Image (spheres, helix red, strand yellow):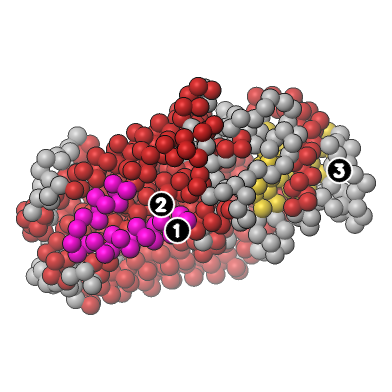
Amino acid sequence: MPDAYHPPRARKSSLPLRYRLAVASRVLAACVGGYYVAYGSTALLTVLLPWERINRVMTASLLSFVVWCVAAFWVFAARHSGRAWWPLLLAGSVMMGAALVMREQGMRP
Amino acid sequence: MKHSFAPSMPWLHTWAGLVVGWVLFVIFLSGTLACFDKELDYWMRPALHHLPAGPTSMDAATRTLRAMAPHAETLYLRPPSARDPSIHGFAFEPDQPYIDVAFNPRDGQRIPDTVGGTFFFTLHYNLQAGTIGMYLVGLAGMLMLMALISGVIIHRRIFKDIFVFRPKIGGQRAWLDGHNLTGVLGLPFHLMMAYTGVAIMVAIYMFAGVQIGYRGDTLKFYEEMLGTPHPVEQHRPPSQLAALGPVVADAERRLGNEGIEYVQVEHVHDASVTLYVLAAGRDQIAGGHRTLIYNGITGAFTGETAGPAPSYRVYQFLSGLHRVQFGGTAFRWMYFLLGTAGCVMLASGMQVWINKRNKAVAAAGLRSGYGLVRALNVGVVAGMPLASIGLLWINRLLPDALADRTSWEARGFCLVWLLAALWAWLRLRQGKPWRDLLAGTATLLVLLPVLDLITRPTSSLLASLRDGDRVLTTIDLSALVLGVAFAWLAQRCGRAQPPASKTARATGQRHGGARAEALPP
């Protein structure tokens, strides 16, 4: 069955709309959803890491691009393009929420 | 076929690569040229080519800069260095464009303006499009990181691919081999550059840390990061500004072979005026970390800053790896060659994409997404080198006294590129747009020393060979070598193409679309 990463075998002049939308959805999920997860992880690590504030912030921020990358890979490996979205949004929101709850902790010098 | 991780990788590679391929090509090529930004800057400023020997006048340059930016709170002055004989001044004024000018180091007067080699540097990090461009570059960098890692996963036979290049087979196979060869050879470099490239802008791209740790107070964040205290304002004007000449001389003595990056004059209009002298540290990848402090009124040395936080030193290391200010000319040439390999990787990768869809392209015609991809391929990949060498021509052809000279140079660059892209688009249906643009680039490159001889006889190849000016000689000779290379490419593109649809069918298409690059030939 043709789906996100198995384009239909019959080589027509144009690919079905569904395939195109799936491509767009995944690229968007990798960019926007991936960034959201990376943002959340930076916020949470800023709170949780043990060191001085500046070192917590810098380390968390520099690691965020790795988190982003892992999230993007997860998006493209997901079984279905629709299913790529919600775990990213959930993970990002949980981490961001936790960081906001522990905000005072994150502000310690 | 089962859904699993590995088969999805070609998919990610294809789409992440295509979506930002052209933007990445612009970033790669401008970054490659920016390896020699200061050398190109020097080439583009003939006023610096025959400087008389004599002392450096930092104070005259400071006066000129202050007159240019009377309301700026902070001035930056970069003293002459081995790579750049000029004094550079930088200043921000509220609601004014950013000031970045070069002064004659002898009398501190402005020299005829040019966008200089900095043009390529700015193009590299924000596409000359301000904040939006900077975010676009960041996103392209992330997608590049993804495309690279997925490329590695695709190539389980990665070491074998290094030794495989079969240009004689022609068509798709040669393009794919070229893509693999340059991609695999340059892989560690490209991975490093993609990561450090986004990491350089970390404070702008990833604001969450500042938001949570500093409640969004960016100034406080930078202060803790750099370890440089901000002088406390006294709300009265300073009696005078200390002479910079002796301060620079004293700092040079204290820093020894670390050298000076720039002098920062903080709070110019307040009695709290302070001078910070930053060490260059060109013998270290991370650059200098020492900052000397001088009283801005008396010029007396008052100590050193605590220095940056350890994590900032890590950041400096990452950014230093990317900006290659260490290690001298040999390293810059290495980065230049690897950057060129990256450009070839991108160009051939996008060609693979179009060749693989050859039949579909023919069926859909030029007024389709495929036509757009083909037009963009020629317009960007062949158009940008033409515009880049065009910029050097424009620099020599515009009169020195022209008002707003830098804008005219930038406009000229864009105009050449637009015309080249338009030409390519018009010639796509019949004709050989690749050959046309590559031949144009080759002509401009080869004739560059001739143009120099006509417009600036004192800076021409003959003069620089006689005077032993290594930088000018190298740039002119490199233009000749590159010109010959482009002529060879143009000649190859001019030949009759092998029946591309046949080769494409034989290699790629029967395996079905985007997945084919994972499969053996």
How busy is the neighbourhood of tag 1: few (under 14 within 10 Å), some, or many (20 plus)?
some
Residue type, label 1: Cys
Between the residue at mark 2 and the residue at mark 3, the CA separation in whole angstroms equals 44 Å
Between the residue at mark 1 and the residue at mark 3, the CA separation in whole angstroms equals 42 Å
Give the residue displayed 89% in from the left and 37% down from the top.
Answer: B298
| Foreground residue among B378 and A75 | B378
Give the residue displayed 26% in from the left and 64% down from the top.
Answer: B426
Return the mark for residue B387: 2
Q: Judge left or right: residue B211 versus residue B206.
A: right
Residue B458 visible (yes or no) = yes
Residue B445, image quadrant: top left
Residue type, label 3: Leu
Return the mark for residue A60: none
Q: Are marks 2 and 3 on the same chain?
A: yes
How busy is the neighbourhood of tag 2: few (under 14 within 10 Å), some, or many (20 plus)?
many
| Label 3 SS | loop
Whichever of labels 2 and 3 marks the residue nearer the N terminus, that label is 3
Q: Chain of mark 3?
A: B
Q: Judge left or right: residue B268 versus residue B508.
A: right
Between the residue at mark 1 and the residue at mark 2, the CA separation in whole angstroms equals 7 Å
Give the percent coordinates (x, y) of residue B63.
79, 45
Q: Which residue is mark 1?
A: B414
Q: Are marks 1 and 3 on the same chain?
A: yes
Give the percent coordinates (x, y) of residue B261.
65, 36
Q: Which residue is mark 3?
A: B241
| Label 2 SS | helix
Q: Chain of mark 2?
A: B
| Foreground residue among B447 and B102 | B447
Which segment did they paint magenta? B412-440
Within the magenta stretch, is there residue B435?
yes
Whichever of labels 1 and 3 marks the residue nearer the N terminus, that label is 3
